[in-house]
Image: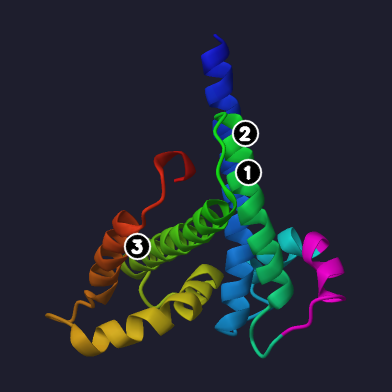
Amino acid sequence: MAANANNALFFLVTTLFELYLGAVLLRILLAWVRADFYNPLSQLVWKLTQPVIAPLTRVVPRWRRLDTAALALLTVLALLYIQVVCSLVNISVGGLSWIWFALLKLVLLLVGLYTLSLFAQAILSWVGPGINNPAANILFSVNEPLLRPVRRVVPPIANLDLSPLFLILALQVVSMLIPLPGIFR
């Protein structure tokens, strides 16, 4: 019974951490690609992250398009995530390994976020091509910088854009190559 409770606690804590890390990461990406700030999805991400990031913006200035306050929060949360996971499974991680695992976790989250957004954009393009909706606009803004170079290499075949498929495959390979221990995935 105790093992089930520990598993449930581990699942709950890691899921909540990953969701908030994903929201902060998405805020950074949306600012970087200059996505429509007034889009309902952008507003959702903004309102979820603003209470924590607002005090940091007074101390940490922006640098060009990079939301450095959000990046600082993301780094601290990733380090805290690694520490919390280690304490939940009763292992210890040294100083540089702790930082390395946090960095790898952020890369893994970025890869997962892009994979999910590419998949969602592909599904939306099949279900309602040409329909303008808030999700499609944000997905286009986030994914287009990655898809554009792939489209130069992989042209449409029979009017089908297969670049998202090739990019998702490449992202999955990158995800498998990230040397992050299983408990942190």
Q: Is residue 56 magenta?
A: yes
Q: Comparing marks 1 and 3, which lies closer to the viewer?
A: 1
The range drawn in magenta is 51-62
Q: As shown in the figure, which amino acid type bears the numbered disc 1?
A: Gln
Q: Comparing marks 2 and 3, which lies closer to the viewer?
A: 2
Between 81 and 96, the residue placed more toward the observer is: 96
Q: Are there few (<14), some (14-19), or many (20+) residues within 10 Å of tag 2?
A: few
Between 103 and 113, the residue placed more toward the observer is: 103
Give how far across and how far down residue 139 sits, in percent: 47, 72
> Can residue 105 be seen?
yes
- Above or below residue 107? Residue 84 is above
Residue behind mark 1? 83
Tag 1 near tag 3, CB within 8 Å: no
Q: As shown in the figure, which amino acid type bears the numbered disc 2?
A: Ser
SS class of the residue under badge 2? Answer: helix
Residue drawn at (36%, 57%) of the image: 178
Closer to the chain start, of discs 2 and 3, is: 2
Q: How is the image coloured?
A: rainbow
Between 141 and 93, the residue placed more toward the observer is: 93
Give how far across and how far down residue 9 sits, in percent: 60, 27
SS class of the residue under badge 3? Answer: helix
SS class of the residue under badge 1? Answer: helix
Tag 2 near tag 1, CB within 8 Å: yes
Q: Are there few (<14), some (14-19), or many (20+) residues within 10 Å of tag 3?
A: few
In the shown orientation, is residue 127 left or right of residue 16? left
Mark sitting on residue 87: 2
